[in-house]
Image (tube, rainbow, N blue to C red):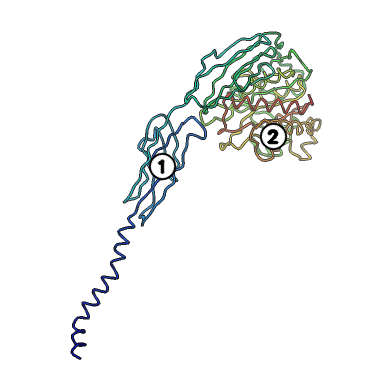
Amino acid sequence: MKQWTAAKRHLPVIILSLMLFLLLPLSAGAAVKKPTITLNTSKVSLCPQAAGRNTYALKVKTSGTISGKIKYTSSNRKVATVSSKGVITGVSGGTAVITVYTPKVKAQCTVSCYNAQLNLTTASSVTLKKGSTYQIKVTTAPKTTTVTYQSSAPAVASVTSAGKITAKAPGRAAIYVRSNGITRTVSVTVPGAGPSVTTLGWNPAWEFAGYSKIHTGSVRLYRSAASNGIVVAVNAGHGTQGGESVRTLCHPDGSAKVTGGSTAAGSVYATAISSGMQFRDGTSEGTANLSLALIVRDRLLAAGYDVLMIRETADNQLDNIARTIFANQYANCHISLHYDSSSYDKGAFCIGVPSISSYINMYPVSTHWQKSNQLGTALITGLRNTGVKIYGSGNIPMDLTQTSYSKIPTIDLEVGDAASDHSSYTQSIIANGVVAGVKLYFGK
């Protein structure tokens, strides 16, 4: 009994000791699980100009209890930026430190960015006799980078994968030299019999001429040295100063538009010719349309087609009706080149003829609308086969002034939008697709 009484006196001490004994492992465990952030690398090397080598996704591992959201920051955003998900993007040459942190812990990664280089060590413009060759030479940084070569007009001047040019036929071609996202151009001229050129003016006696309000400009008809007898009207959209302040009838019979567009459905009058949109880099659509049209012209001539150039200058005083009437008089088909006003690089498409009975039965639409749609399908197929991105089915039916006054197969071709690349290299690819589509449509 005395022993139990003594034990009772020591019971609180025994219990406290037991509790401390049980808590010791927990305290030791908590000390081991100190919060940490670990990155999969401490060094990253990027080339801002090189697609596929200009970004890096950090992988982050944590241990212990991390309080707060993990954040990312760059010590020099002019060299490299980092997203909220840890994707580093090189901006320019230099060094930056990427810090991954929470309120209590951080980790760092050093980013080194080097600027790629591609320099021509031979001439950027050459004149070659038919059958002669020329070797392009370049220097690059880094030296092991891949260099590719492409001719804008292989029928005029071809180029091998090693940069050797061969002059094939009279005309002009651009050889595109590319590496690490950089493009250099070698202009090639092969002298010889070129196309004949005739300047053509307005004739008020032409059918529908009275509907045009702006027609003091002229067009140029090119006859290929190897003409197959087919004339393609190439219309660089927009490019008529003051055209937005003038109104013309949507349809020659005075009826209202049957679909929406830049002019609303139900409208009887439309803008004679709009000024177009602006690209993200500030370039006007009219400027981009013209540079593309000039490439398409040269490509068609090299392929044996004659070309009616509706516009070859920044401003040609011809409204949409006048342009269509010129095409009616001299061409076998009419292709109007545009970029859409949307801004998410959705791809190319054509504006087809809406299958609305009142519209397709209206003269002169009734004489050609099926062939217009066939032309559109052929052009989209040519673009797709050349690697151009296509939006949806590639056809959006719409009631256009051009379609409403045309007596030949006609199509409005939207080759991209305000977010699209409109460099000469990309436009060269588009031009190849247009020519492929024309060949598909005419069968030669």
Residue type of the residue flagged with mark 2: Ile
The residue singled out by tag 2 in the image is 351
Q: Earlier in the sequence, mark 1 or mark 2?
A: 1
As rendered, which of 91 and 161 lies closer to the eye? 161
Q: Which residue occupies 66% across, 18% down?
A: 158
Residue corresponding to mark 1: 41
Q: How far apart are marks 1 and 2 (CA)?
A: 51 Å
* Depth order, front residue of 410/322: 410
Compare residues 26 and 84 and report the one nearer the observer: 26
Pointers 1 and 2 in contact (CB under 8 A)? no
* Circle 2 crowding by C-alpha within 10 Å: few under 14, some 14–19, many from 20: many
SS at circle 2 = strand
Residue shown at the point (40%, 45%) measured from the top left: 39
**Label annotation for residue 92:** none
Q: Which residue is drawn at 32% across and 62% down?
A: 29
Q: Residue 360: image x %, image y %?
A: 78, 36
Q: Nearer the viewer's eye, disc 1 or disc 2?
A: 1
Residue 438 spot, x, y in % from top left: 74, 26
Q: Is mark 1 on a helix, strand or loop?
A: loop
* 67 is higher (above) or lower (below) than 158: below
User: Where the C terminus falls, by quadrant?
Assistant: top right
